[in-house]
């Protein structure tokens, strides 16, 4: 089927080329050339610069008074890239995992986990059947 489609496409393309070649050609009418006026004036002289000027350089032979050379090199860009990498890494880093409250006996957490299924060690609370969350008070607390 695809072979037949290719043949039909080739025949259609060839017939389009052949049928459009019989159209008579039409030449564009001849127009008079347009002469453009120019505001450019030809200059036939060259004035040399005064002695002591070298390709337009004017001033001191050495560094001018008060000149201070800034030898920055690549130090600032590298420091900026390093600082950007450190700051960007700190911003993109995931937040630190929450820790348990310190100063409470680990057995307290074990007791609360064993007693209440909804116990949250981060807030030291559990969800009772009715009402708001309550604080877990164990014998180890």
Image (cartoon, grey):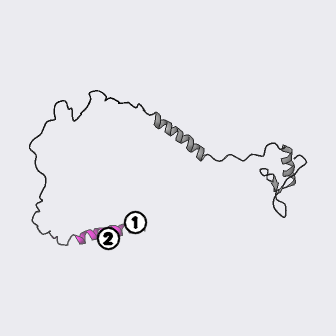
User: Residue 115 versus residue 61: which sits nearer the camera?
Assistant: 61
Q: Residue at x 35, y 67 (%)?
A: 7
Report x, y in % for residue 118: 81, 56
User: Residue 37 versus residue 16: which sits nearer the camera?
Assistant: 37
User: Is 139 rendered above or below residue 80?
Assistant: below
Side of 91 where 34 appears, left or right: left
Q: Residue at x 61, y 45 (%)?
A: 93
User: Residue 29 versus residue 4: which sits nearer the camera?
Assistant: 29
How busy is the neighbourhood of tag 1: few (under 14 within 10 Å), some, or many (20 plus)?
few
Q: Quadrant of the N terminus?
A: bottom left
**Would you name the residue on which mark 1 appears?**
3
Whether 6 is among the magenta residues is: yes
In the rendered image, the residue lying farthest to the top is 62
User: Is 27 rendered above or below residue 80?
Assistant: below
Q: Which mark is residue 12?
A: 2
User: Is 92 rendered above or below residue 10?
Assistant: above
Magenta residue span: 1-29
Residue 116, located in which quarter of the rendered image?
A: bottom right
How far, Cα to Cα, is label 2 from label 1?
14 Å
Side of 2 where 11 appears, left or right: left
Q: Residue at x 39, y 68 (%)?
A: 5
Report x, y in % for residue 58: 24, 33
Q: Nearer the viewer, mark 2 or mark 1?
A: 2
Report x, y in % for residue 11: 31, 69
Q: Secondary structure at mark 2?
A: helix
């Amino acid at each position: 089927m695809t072979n037949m489609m290719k043949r039909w496409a080739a025949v259609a393309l060839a017939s389009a080329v052949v049928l459009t070649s019989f159209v008579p050609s039409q030449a564009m009418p001849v127009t008079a050339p347009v002469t453009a006026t120019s505001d450019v004036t030809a200059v036939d002289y060259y004035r040399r610069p005064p002695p002591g000027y070298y390709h337009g350089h004017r001033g001191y032979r050495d560094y001018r008074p008060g000149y201070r050379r800034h030898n920055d090199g690549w130090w600032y860009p590298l420091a900026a890239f390093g600082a950007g990498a450190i700051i960007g890494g700190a911003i993109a880093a995931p937040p630190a995992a929450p820790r348990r409250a310190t100063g409470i006996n680990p057995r307290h957490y074990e007791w609360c986990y064993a007693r209440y299924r909804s116990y949250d060690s981060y807030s030291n609370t559990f969800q009772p059947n009715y009402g708001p969350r309550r604080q877990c008070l164990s014998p180890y607390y």
